[in-house]
Image (tube, rainbow, N blue to C red):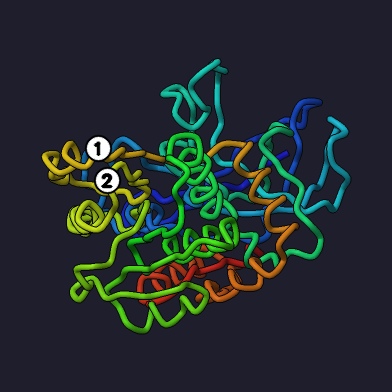
Amino acid sequence: MINQTYRLVSPRQFEVTYKDKMINANKVVVRPTHLSICAADQRYYTGSRGKEVMDKKLPMALIHEGIGKVMHDPTGHFKVGDRVVLVPNTPTEQHEIIAENYLRSSRFRSSGYDGFMQDYMFMDPDRLVLLPVSLNPKVAAFTELITITMHAISRFERIAHQKRAIFGVWGDGNLGFITSLILKKRYPNSKVFIFGKTSYKLDHFSFVDAAYQINDIPADIIVDHAFECVGGRGSESAIQQMIDHVQPEACLALLGVSEYPVEVETRMVLEKGITLIGSSRSGREDFVRTVNFLAEYPEVAEYLETLIGGCYPVRSIEDITNVFEADLTSSWGKTVIEWEI
C-alpha cells in the first residue's frame, strides 16, 4: 500500500512523500489520531538546531508524542479499533544493563528518523501500549512526555536515600507540572515545592504545598531532593539554586535539555555529597507504568487536562504549518493535533 509521510524539508516547510509499504505478519498497522508538539519538534521546525544538524536530520517527519487506532494486526496482540500509545524509541539490540533509551544504537522517531506525521504507522507490537478506554485522548496524546517523568522518578528511587519529606521541582512549564503532580500523588505524605519564574504559570500548580518565585526564594527553604525541569540556558541557574537549597547527600534529578554547556558548582556538589542523576527519554516499560498509573489514578489524568493548551484539526499541509505557528505563540500547555489529514 502507498503510505503518505509529511516531512519537514527545511525550516517551516513541509512536503508530502509517498512510500510503498508492505503489510507483513510482524507489523501492526496503526492510524495516528492525536499528536502533540514537543519543544524538540519546534527546534527543528524553526531551524534553531543549527545548519549542520538540520542538514544531517532533514528531510524528516516530525512528532514523537502520539496515539493511534489499530487498523490491522496480524500478530494477534490487539483488536482492530484498539486505541494505543505509540512508543517512539526503537531499539535494535538488548543489553543486560543499559536501558533501551540509552543504547547508542537505538533509533528515536523525529530525531533523525521519521516521526508520527504519517497516514499509517507500521510498528512492532512491543512499540505499542493499549490505552484505557476512559482516558481522554487529548491527554493520552502527550503520554510520551509523562513517561519522561515516570522514567526519571524510577531512576531516582533506585539511587536516592529514603529521607523524602520535601521535594523541590524547578521549572513551571509542562514537565515541571507533570513532575510535581506525579511526585505529589506518588508520595502523598511528602511535601512538594515548585520553583518558577512566571506567576500565572505557578497559579496552575494548585496541588503543591508551596510555590516560590526563583528570584525570591527564602534562604531557609531546604528540600531533601530536587528535580530540574527547566532546560535551555535557564538550567544553569536552576541547578545552582538546587545545590543551594538541598540537604547534604541529596539527589538532583536532571530532566531539562540544554543545547549549550552549563556550569555546575562542583565544589558544593562535593562538599554536600550531592548525586546528579541524568535522565533522557524513556522505554516501553516506562510507557506501561505510565498507562497503568493513569488508569489507577484517574484524578491525575483530570489534572493533566489543565495542560491541554490548544487542540487543532489538521487536514492539509497548510494546517500543519498553521498548528506549529500557533504552538509557537502558546503561553501555556501542550498543543494537541487531531490528525485527520
Q: Which label number is shown at residue 253?
A: none
Most foreground residue, 106 or 282: 282
Callout 2–callout 1 Cβ contact below 8 Å: yes
In percent of width and height, residue 142 lies at 57, 58
| Element marked by disc 2 | loop
Q: Residue at x 37, y 46 (%)?
A: 253
Q: What residue would you read off at disc 2?
A: 248
Q: Residue at x 69, y 65 (%)?
A: 137
170, above or below 93, in the image: below
Q: What residue would you read off at disc 1?
A: 273
Most foreground residue, 208 or 335: 208
13, above or below 111, in the image: below
In percent of width and height, residue 140 lies at 65, 60
Q: Residues within 10 Å of mark 2 (few under 14, many from 20)?
A: some
Give how far apart the Cα atoms at labels 2 and 1 are.
6 Å
103, above or below 181, in the image: above
Q: Quadrant of the C terminus?
A: bottom right
Q: Residues within 10 Å of mark 1 (few under 14, many from 20)?
A: some
| Element marked by disc 1 | loop
Would residue 341 be seen by someone viewing this image from the given angle? no
Q: Residue at x 74, y 34 (%)?
A: 125
Is 270 on the left-hand or right-hand side of 170?
left
In percent of width and height, residue 224 lies at 37, 53
